[in-house]
């Protein structure tokens, strides 16, 4: 499986688990069930049981232990979503939309860009854009 799909499974798992203790839980749960339902009724039933266990484990946790419980549940869902994407990479767009729709508030995106030689980069993200131009001509010392 590609690194991109692994990262997608991780971000979707985090979004799902974060939603379990919010008022968006039922919408998130239903979207995940539809996704697993595309793989068959049996998979949807298994996912439904896992979703119920996740919600139960997170809703009964003390605030001081909630982050550790979220980490544990995220690992469970990362594995399940990775397996689903491994079998059905065509589900990636739907899962990407899910992760974006249910990303925890305040989630920051980090992007690292490197320009070399005479490169120009055009970078667009969020509500901003950036153009970087590297006009390094080089010298004998660079060789």
Image (spheres, rainbow, N blue to C red):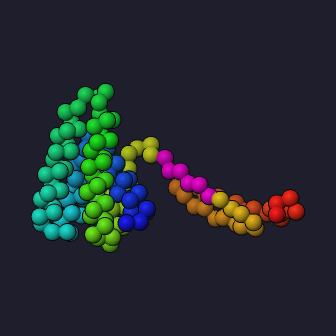
Q: Is residue 129 above or below residue 15?
A: below
Left or right placement of residue 100 versus residue 48 in this view: right
**131 sits to left or right of 19:** right
Q: Is residue 126 left or right of residue 3?
A: right
Query: Would you identify the image quadrant in which residue 59 lies?
Result: top left
Q: Residue at left 29%, top 59%?
A: 81
Front one among 123 and 9: 9
Q: Nearer the viewer, residue 128 or 122?
A: 122
Q: Is residue 110 magenta?
A: yes
The image shows residue 113 at horizontal and vertical percentages of 62, 58
Lateral position of residue 4 relative to residue 134, left or right: left
Magenta segment: does it hold 101?
no
Which residue corresponds to the image point at 15% horizontal and 61% vertical from the top-left?
A: 44
Of helix, strand and loop, which mostly describes the magenta segment?
A: loop
Image quadrant for the N terminus?
bottom left
Spot occupied by residue 34 in the image (x, y as percentages of width and height): 21, 63
Q: List x then y, in percent, for residue 27.
A: 24, 53
Res. 91 in view = no
The quarter of the picture where the C terminus appears is bottom right
Q: For the magenta stretch, what is the residue range?
A: 108-113
């Amino acid at each position: 499986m590609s690194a991109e799909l692994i990262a997608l499974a991780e971000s979707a798992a985090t979004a799902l688990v974060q939603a379990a203790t919010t008022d968006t839980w039922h919408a998130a749960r239903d979207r995940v069930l539809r996704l697993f339902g595309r793989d068959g009724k049996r998979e949807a039933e298994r996912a439904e049981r896992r979703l119920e266990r996740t919600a139960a484990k997170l809703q009964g946790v003390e605030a001081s232990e909630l982050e550790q419980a979220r980490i544990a549940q995220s690992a469970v869902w990362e594995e399940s979503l990775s397996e689903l994407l491994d079998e059905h990479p065509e589900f990636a767009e739907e899962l990407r939309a899910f992760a974006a729709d249910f990303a925890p508030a305040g989630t920051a995106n980090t992007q690292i860009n490197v320009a070399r030689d005479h490169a120009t980069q055009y970078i667009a993200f969020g509500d901003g854009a950036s153009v970087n131009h590297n006009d390094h001509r080089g010298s004998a010392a660079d060789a």
